[in-house]
Amino acid sequence: MITSIETRAAVPARPAASHPVLDVVVPVYNEETDLEPCVRRLHAHLVAHFPYPFQITIADNASVDGTLAVAEALVTELPGVQVRHLDAKGRGRALRAAWSASDAPVLAYMDVDLSTDLAALLPLVAPLISGHSDVAIGTRLARTSRVVRGARREFISRTYNLLLRGTLAVRFSDAQCGFKAIRADVARELLPLVQDTGWFFDTELLVLAQRAGLRIHEVPVDWIDDPDSRVDVVATAVADLRGIGRLGRALLTGALPLNELRVQLGRAPLAAPPELPPTGLLRQLVRFGAVGVASTCAYLLLFTLTRGALGAQPANLLALLLTAIANTAANRRLTFGIAGRRHVTRHHVQGLLAFGLGLALTSGSLAVLHAATDPSRAVELSVLVAANLAATVMRFLLLRLAMHHRP
């Protein structure tokens, strides 16, 4: 049942637009006390701070108290507010019904207790309105988030999200914060695949979005725990574990059409930039020399820092290996004008070949030096500099040949 009644009160016309840009769903079950102040506060915030037409949908999950009556009274008073009544419980079921019926291009939801500071609402939905992102979530686990809640809920939340990372390889940080948004065109494709109708609904939707290659935007939020929350933590945790197992099996067995989703919804890979034309020999020598100076300085610094702990030969190996990899990448782009990932593996293999020759030259120099005398650190470094200069000339010739070879 949907109720939407206009009012004659003198209020801004913007929220009552026939085609809202944003539809904020507030799922409720037996919330006759908290519903009215929540919706009034949300409506006032949107009128004052949201620059687009909006709609607020109260999704009543089969409440048995006076929640529906309170919602219908709010509809008669506040423009842009509607109520949808469901005959069965379940937050996921309520969101699926409300989002599926909405004609707004951006869909959101928040918990009725408004634990999340509403100042985060516009940052949440702005990337979806602009098309930059596909799904947006509030996160209580970012470093810049400010959260007030008990130790038990903090532990449960962090444990749950760590479990998701270990089992479903998720990359988003906070699956269960009741503050999310999604583009309507994305929701139309994902909602039919989401099986859960309760609290695991959020997690399942986000996992599908991630596996489909969608961009998930995260917004650090200020969040204050509701001490009167009636969520059954134990029952919710058990249901979530079952949901993780079910979704994990579906992913492993290929029961979900992820490839089709990626093709239909995923963002295409970025095209590699065109390769720059090769520069002349003199310019290449100048750039190679500049990269070589930086690499030599980095090499000497790493050798000096690790010489005491590792010994001369191991320190030489570590310093030369690390700087050789960085040197190849820098010369590839700056000296020889090659961008993108084409032939990058081959170039690094050839760079490591040059590294091996340089290692033989520098290690041999160290071995001869230590066999002949007990050198000071200054003499040791001087010999290494000379050996590296010889290795650099050889490296330039080998890399130039490799980089200019275009099969």
Image (cartoon, helix red, strand yellow):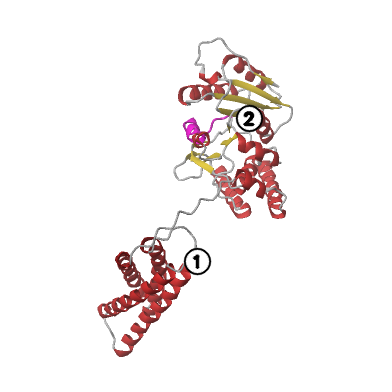
Q: Is residue 380 above or below residue 60?
A: below
Q: Is residue 67 left or right of residue 135?
A: right
* Relative depth, front residue between 28 and 297: 297
Q: Residues within 10 Å of mark 2 (few under 14, many from 20)?
A: many
- Residue sitting at the far right: 87
Q: Is residue 104 left or right of residue 279?
A: right
Q: Is residue 115 magenta?
A: yes
Q: Secondary structure at mark 2?
A: strand
**Nearest to viewer (mark 2 / mark 1):** 1
Q: What x and y, as percent, mark residue 81?
A: 59, 21
The image quarter in which residue 101 lies:
top right
| Quadrant location of the N terminus in the rendered image | top right
Give the number of marks: 2
Badge 2 amino acid: Pro
Mark 2 or mark 1: whose residue is earlier in sequence: 2
- Stretch of the chain drawn in magenta: 112-125
Q: Residue at x 50, y 40 (%)?
A: 132
Tell me the residue that label 2 is attached to.
27
Distance Cα–Cα, label 2 vs label 1? 52 Å
Q: Residue at x 53, y 25 (%)?
A: 42
Q: Residues within 10 Å of mark 1 (few under 14, many from 20)?
A: few
Q: What x and y, as percent, mark residue 195?
A: 71, 41
The image quarter in which residue 56 lies:
top right
Tell me the residue that label 1 is attached to.
345
Badge 1 amino acid: Thr
Q: What x and y, as percent, mark residue 160?
A: 60, 48
* Relative depth, front residue between 139 and 190: 190
Residue 34 seen in the figure: no
Q: Is residue 274 above or below residue 41?
A: below
